[in-house]
Amino acid sequence: MWPRDDAEAQSDDDAALAGSQPGPWIGPGGDAIIDSLGLDLVGLVEREHGTGKAGEILSLQVFAEGRGAGSVDGDVDVTRVLLVGLGDGSPAAHRKAGAALARATRGAERVASTVTATSGDAEIVAFVEGVVLATFALDAHRSKPLKETKAPLRALVLAGSDHGSEAVERGMARASASWYARELVHTPSNVKDPAWMAEQARDVGRATGMDVHVRDEKKLEAEGFGGIVAVGVGSARPPRLVAMRYEPRGSRATTPHVVLVGKGITFDSGGLSLKPRASMTTMKTDMSGAATVLGVMSAVSALDVPVRVTGLLALAENMPGASAQRPSDVITQYDGTTVEVLNTDAEGRLVLADAIAYAVAELQPDAIVDIATLTGAATVGLGRSAAALYSTDDELAGTLAAAGDASGERMWRMPLVEDYRHALDSAVADVAHIATSKVNGGSIVAALFLERFTGGVSWAHLDIAGTGRADKDTAELVKGGTGYGVRALLTWLETYGTDGTRPAEGE
């Protein structure tokens, strides 16, 4: 069901079906339903004041004489017909339509849909993402499933088209990666700790043939990862740094190399700078950045991403144990920078700084992108609808933002304000990790701190404190951890170098 903006109209009775008059019109498959079941779909649209906006659902129950369903083509029983609004027909509209269809058909065994019968590949990918992700639920920790919860749709048949199978597979790969990230985020912290996350990475490595290297607390301390060690030292469950390496087929030394860095605080109590109780209850999701990176790495091979990708998971549990770091401690990051720690609840930037400095020193990346639930200030400024994007490279920022728009995971570029840099001055160390003078702009100050460790490498930082969690079910999102960034980063990686903004292999 599509809204129409054109002013032309015909006098035919089936004008609304054909789409030749203003207002919503019924797309492919409508004529077959009308002919086979004798339903007045045009009348349904008129009675329900249908608009055709993306995600709108109009439903009509089907009853045939002597039985509970009508029949199409003599062999397919139909119990319900739904008209699904497609708005402007864009990928975003398809994603929203897919999510609405999935929610409207919970409890159904099988649904046949002609929504994508005339859609292009990008629209099919988005539709599949919407259908799959809107059904997300995590029942692994219930002793019994909730009786009042309808099971998600079991099978969806995309009817009316003989093409698009590759797009369906691509949509499934992207949606599965986002689903996996959500599972990680929703796993309770008494189950997941740094070692557990490292084992999930090993599982992905075994499944994809990807090289995975894990540094434990002893190696971290011996090699100078002072930030990760300091954050994790207060917990009985020690930190880890995971490196996952993907090499595309035919990769050479000249193949561009991207490093993704994810903040992985498996639980954040705030350390000795203890959080209030209410603020602590969602902190199992403070490893959302690492979950996103792991989700991306789980799909790069299936999507045949054309660049080399290293995923770094900086993992620690921030607890107020007897050995925890104290406000006023001075630590030494991987690159030798000394940092005055003034608030142990600003721990994410410390683990990210180590991982970024390591990438610069050892991995020779063409670009570094870190992603983290880093600051409440980002949520205050942008809410939950867009991530805060910081970058030292205009082209990198532009391609990431475009990938965000294309994937439905929006970003808004924020400034690296030079005048705020003095706020990180320390009287006792090279730098403080939070502002020592009042400038506000907490998300900007955190980004300025991270920038110190990028060594001139093209770098972008995504603060997903808002977008990493959803307050309610909306479109393809479900309440809780969203897995934000998986689709955006996969979109960016799939197109890296193809738009002329980065050198292609061999150039």
Image: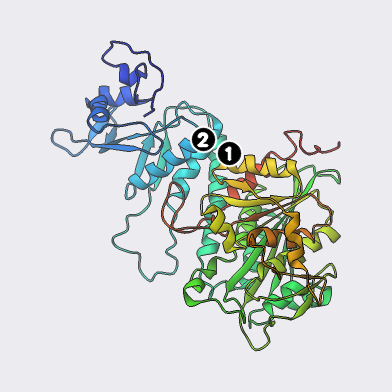
Toward the bottom, the furthest residue is: 322
In the image, taking residue 82 as reference, residue 47 lies left or right, namely left
Amino acid tagged 1: Ala
As drawn, 500 above or below 257: above
Residue visible at 65% across and 54% down?
462
Task: Name the residue beneath numbered marker 1.
Answer: 406
Residue marked by disc 2: 91
Tell which of 237 and 344 is nearer to you: 344
User: Toward which corner of the image does residue 263 lie, by quadrant?
Assistant: bottom right
Query: Looking at the image, is mark 1 or mark 2 earlier in the sequence?
Result: 2
Residue 329, percent from left and from top? 74, 81
The answer to which image quadrant residue 231 occupies is: bottom right
Q: Amino acid at mark 2?
A: Pro
Sort mark 2 into few (<14), some (14-19) or many (20+) by Cα contacts within 10 Å: many
| Residue found at x 86% / y 36% | 507
- Tell whether 241 sits left or right of 291: right
